[in-house]
Amino acid sequence: MQQFIDLLSKVIFFTIIATIVLAVVTYAAYKVRSARRGPASVRPAPIVGDDGSFLEPVLFEKYIPKGRETREE
């Protein structure tokens, strides 16, 4: 039984280490990709209307169901 516990603890340990390594590699790949794209990818894309003209983005108000209004303190 002790051999099984030793094997299981090694499997769990290496799984945790592999997960951390994959997380670091994924984050580094994300940072490299975002650095390649540059600041142009941060700007929102313009919205094109039906007639081909560009429209300003529309912001909506937050929907609050009746009876659930927050009280001002």
Image: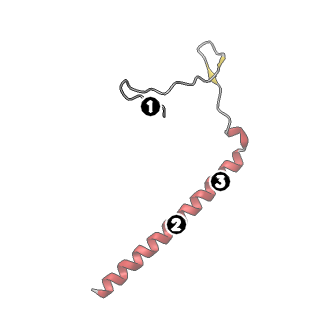
Residue 1 higher or lower than 70, as above or below: below
Q: Which of labels 3 and 1 is toward the front?
A: 1
The image shows residue 47 at horizontal and vertical percentages of 62, 23
Query: In the image, what residue occupies the spot 62% across and 56% down?
Result: 29
Q: Could you say whether the residue bearing mark 3 is in a helix, strand or loop?
A: helix
The image shows residue 61 at horizontal and vertical percentages of 51, 24
Q: Could you say whether the residue bearing mark 1 is in a helix, strand or loop?
A: loop
Q: What kind of residue is marked 3?
A: Lys
Query: Gap between marks 3 and 1, in whole Å?
Result: 42 Å
Q: Identify which residue, 32 or 16, lies in the foreground.
A: 16
Where does label 3 land, which residue? 31
The circle on residue 20 is 2
Q: Are marks 3 and 2 in contact (CB under 8 Å)?
A: no
The image shows residue 5 at horizontal and vertical percentages of 33, 82
Q: Identify which residue, 60 or 9, lies in the foreground.
A: 60
Q: Earlier in the sequence, mark 3 or mark 1?
A: 3
Where does label 1 land, which residue? 71
Query: In the image, what residue occupies the spot 70% across and 45% down?
Result: 37
Q: What kind of residue is marked 1?
A: Arg
Question: Which quadrant holds residue 58?
Answer: top right
The circle on residue 4 is none
Residue 11 higher or lower than 2, as above or below: above
Q: Residue reaching furthest front?
A: 73
71 sits left or right of 52 in the view = left
Residue 59 higher or lower than 40, as above or below: above
